[in-house]
Structure formats: structure tokens, C-alpha cells
Amino acid sequence: MAKRAPKETRKDKLAELKARHFTPKGREQRIAKALEILKRPGPTFKLDRKTVKWIAQDVELENL
């Protein structure tokens, strides 16, 4: 098994990837889009704990 990179190295790499992906260009649009989505009504159905567990563990649902 391969050795993991030190934690600081992984954090640095993640910070670098985030900086490349989330550039200042388009920032306002991304924020506006996220806020719009958050304003939408959420799901109106309730699932019991057993059903949520079944959904999370069902292998067939992983490929949807």
C-alpha cells in the first residue's frame, strides 16, 4: 500500500486546487446562484431512519 502524503502537503494541494477552480472571475455569479438555490423550498417528504439506511447501503442505487 502506498504511503499517504503528510497532512500539510494534502492541505496545501487542496488549497491550490480550490484556488485554481474558484477564481475571482465569476465569483459574484457563483454566490448569486448558490443563494438562489438555497431560497428554493426543500424536500417536502420525510424518510424514516430505516429507509435512509437502506438507500445509503443499496449497491444498485450507487450507479444512478
Image (cartoon, grey):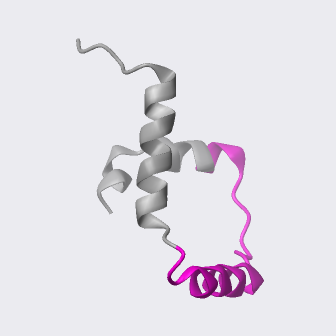
- x%, y% of residue 25? 50, 81
- x%, y% of residue 4? 35, 18
- x%, y% of residue 29? 58, 88
What residue is shown at x 58% (from left), y 79% (from top)?
A: 27
Q: Is residue 62 magenta?
A: no
Residue nearest the viewer, comparing 49 with 24: 24
- x%, y% of residue 8? 51, 26
Say which quadrant the N terminus sits in.
top left
* Relative to 61, residue 2 above or below: above
What residue is shown at x 42% (from left), y 40% (from top)?
A: 13
Q: Does the magenta stretch include residue 38?
A: yes
* Relative to 17, residue 30 above or below: below
* Relative to 34, residue 53 above or below: above
What residue is shown at x 50% (from left), y 50% (from top)?
A: 55
Say which quadrant the C terminus sits in.
bottom left
What residue is shown at x 32% (from left), y 51% (from top)?
A: 60
- Using residue 4 as the reference point, say whether residue 16 is left or right of it: right
Q: In the rendered image, which quarter is residue 39 located in?
A: bottom right
Q: Which residues make up the magenta segment?
A: 24-51
Residue nearest the viewer, comparing 20 with 59: 20
